[in-house]
Amino acid sequence: MAKDRRMEKMKRKIEHVLGIFLSEDNAGYRLIVFIILFAFSVLIGWYFENDARAAFVLYAAVPILLFVGVMGGAAMYLQEIYEFKGFWKVLHYLFASLFSPWHLNLKISNGKKEVESGEMHVLDRIGGPGILKVAPGNAVVLETLTAPSRIIGAGENKLNRGEIIKDVITLGEFYGSLDDIPVTTRDGIDVKISGVEFRFCINSKKHDVTVRTLQNPYPFSRRSVSDFVYNRTVSAAGTVGAWTMSVEGAIKGIITRHISNCDLDDLLSPGAREVHPMYELHDKFSQPENREIKKAVGARLLWINVGQLVPVSKEIDEKRLSVWLAKQSGIIKTLQAQGEAEKASSRERGRAESQAVLLRSIAQALQETDAGGKQDKAKINKNLWNIVLARTAQILESMSAAHEYKDDKGA
């Protein structure tokens, strides 16, 4: 029992020493140990062998050839399984992984890995160790085979052993557009939204633009970048969409929820409503819970145009047009009737005024008529004749006005 404990303790110590010796931080020590062992082997050969040439071949050349053969075989193995075209880059990667003096480096700018067309970079395919030179305005998400590792920003960053590049994110502003979004209104009519445009960016720390510097012009929140990369949408076919599709999906959700809670008439002709439903939709994107699409995708909406709404069926448009024309025709007829009524009312007022003038003239003529016989008969006859002429003129005027009204109405 005690012997087993000692063996287990010895095993743990050996594993600990090997772990330290094989760790990535001690690659330089491995190179020193390798050189010391090689020199020790050569010295042993010179000491035990009388022939110096045989000693060199046996104790120097053979270990070198064995080492070169092992490294070459490992490089060819990696070249075959990863389908690399260049042998020397893979050999360089293996040598750097063992002894770490000259790591491979990979440049990242404009949201892309700078790799020649048709070529594959070793760090991109296999992972670390290596050096990532990240240009300002970019963020790189790293992960291991089992879990996310870390997120790095601009600068020269070391890619540790076992880390691979998950994704590269551009930290500037993004532009997107959506067309033909199918929605069903509350009254069951299918419509589509077209011409939706928007701009967004990655959430920064507290959205404070004052923390920007020349070295780091695009500060970002690592939590937001992580959400942006890992909270992606998956299609029905099981494919993972681009990371910008998460923002598009969030915007689609807000638009469809709002439109589905409104009737078509309220959306196209709201009437006397204080606020147009499409304006209400635009205002929804200004609310903190929608503007900061942080919980879902880690993005912040900067600007949006909610587009326009069009019914899917053309018959609906034609029916709405015919209803509108009928409504406008009724309004026109109402206005015409009001005009005719005003015209008739004005005519009657004019006739009443003319009759009043006639009555005043008759009364005046009667007053001037000599009822007591003091005036001569010629003057009396003249006044009576004036009364007859005035009454005749009134009758002719009434007949003429009635004839003109019938002509206007017939036209």
Image (tube, rainbow, N blue to C red):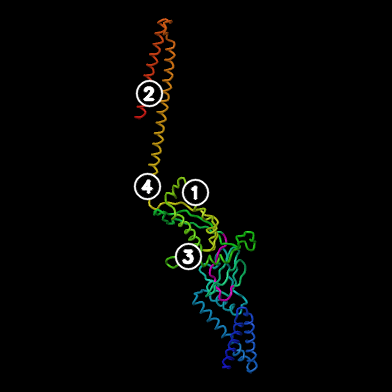
Q: Earlier in the sequence, mark 2 or mark 1?
A: 1
Q: Earlier in the sequence, mark 4 or mark 2?
A: 4
Q: Earlier in the sequence, mark 1 or mark 4?
A: 1
Residue 220 position, x and y percent, is 59, 63
Q: Would you say 395 lies left or right of 34 here? A: left
Mark 3 or 4: the one toward you:
4
| Circles 3, 1 touching at the beta carbon (< 8 Å) | no
- Amino acid tagged 4: Lys
Residue 33 position, x and y percent, is 63, 84
Residue 115 position by quadrant: bottom right
- Amino acid tagged 1: Val
- Amino acid tagged 2: Ala
**Tag 4 residue:** 319
Magenta segment boundaries in residue numbering = 159-172
Residue 359 position, x and y percent, is 42, 17
Mark-to-mark CA distance, 3 and 2: 80 Å
| Circles 2, 1 touching at the beta carbon (< 8 Å) | no
Residue under the image location 53 percent in, 70 percent down: 166
Residues packed near mark 4 inside 10 Å, few (<14), some (14 to 19) or many (20 plus)? few
Residue under the image location 52 percent in, 75 percent down: 146
**Tag 3 residue:** 233
Q: Earlier in the sequence, mark 3 or mark 1?
A: 3
**Tag 1 residue:** 275
Viewer-proximal residue, 222 or 363?
363
| Helix, strand or loop at mark 3 | loop
Mark 3 or 2: the one toward you:
2
- Amino acid tagged 3: Thr
Q: Which mark is residue 171?
A: none
**Tag 2 residue:** 401
Mark-to-mark CA distance, 4 and 2: 45 Å
Residue 60 sits above or below residue 330 on the image: below
Residues packed near mark 3 inside 10 Å, few (<14), some (14 to 19) or many (20 plus)? many
